[in-house]
Image (tube, rainbow, N blue to C red):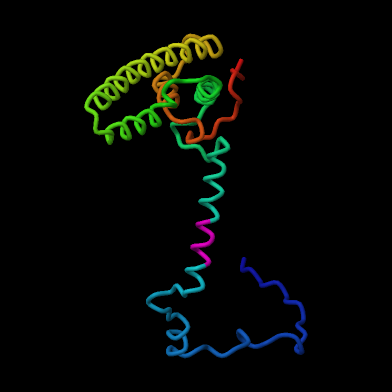
Amino acid sequence: MAKTPAPEAPKDESTSTVGKGKATPSRAEQEAARKRPLVPDTKEAKAQRKAELASARERARIGMANGEQKYLPARDQGPQRKFARDFVDAGWHLGEAVMPAMVVVIVATFIPLQFIQYWAFVALWVFIFFVIGDMIITSIRVKRAVRDKFGESKVEKGLGWYASMRSVQMRFMRLPKAQVRRGQYPS
C-alpha cells in the first residue's frame, strides 16, 4: 500500500517567498566575507583585554590577601592550613625580627672597629639559633593543636614546616594576611 502525502495547507501568496528570499552570493563575495586580518587584534581590543586581565589579577590579589578560599594557592588551602596560619599569627615569634637583625649587622660592618663587627656576627648567629629553636617549638605546638582539633589520623603532612616558615616572615609581609589579632589563638 503506497503512502499518500498529506494535503498541504493553502499558502498565502502575499507572505511567502520563492526560494530563500535572497540571491546566492558569488564566490568572490563569500571569500571576502570570510577574510580576516592576519593580526586580528586592534589596539582597542588589546587595551580592553589588558584592563580586564589587570582587574582580574587585582581581584585575585585582594582575595588571596584576605584569605578567600578560591583565590588561595594549593599550599594554603584547607581548614588545617587556615588553623595553622591563625595559630602562628596569634603569637609572637623571634623569626619576625631576623630581617631587622640582619640590617643591624650590615650597618655594624661599616663601623671600622673589628671588635664590633666580630660581636655583631656572633650575636646574629646566636639569634639565628634561637630563631631555629622557636621554629621547632612552633611546629610542635601547631601539630599538637591540629591533632587535638582534627584528630590524630587527620594531620596533613608538612603542616609543621608550613607553620614554622610562616613564623619567620614579618607579620605585615605574610600572605594571606593575618586574620587574627595577637593573642587571639584559634580554638
Frontmost residue, 21 versus 53: 53
User: For residue 28, what is the image quadrant?
Assistant: bottom left
Q: Is residue 119 above or below residue 23?
A: above
Tell me where residue 165 appears, x and y as whole percent: 40, 25
Tell me where residue 103 appears, x and y as whole percent: 36, 33
Considering the image in quadrants, where does the N terminus appear? bottom right
- At x 68%, y 87%, the residue is 17
User: For residue 19, what is the image quadrant?
Assistant: bottom right
Q: Is residue 21 above or below residue 134?
A: below
Frontmost residue, 128 versus 74: 128
**What is the number of callouts on the image?**
0
Q: Is residue 135 above or below residue 173?
A: above
Residues rendered magenta in the picture = 48-54
Tell me where residue 138 appears, x and y as whole percent: 44, 15
Q: Residue furthest left?
A: 114
- At x 51%, y 14%, the residue is 146
Q: Is residue 17 above or below residue 38?
A: below
Tell me where residue 14 appears, x and y as whole percent: 77, 89
- At x 61%, y 84%, the residue is 20
Q: Is residue 162 left or right of residue 182?
A: left
Frontmost residue, 68 versus 140: 140
Dominant SS of magenta comes to helix
Q: Is residue 102 left or right of residue 18?
A: left
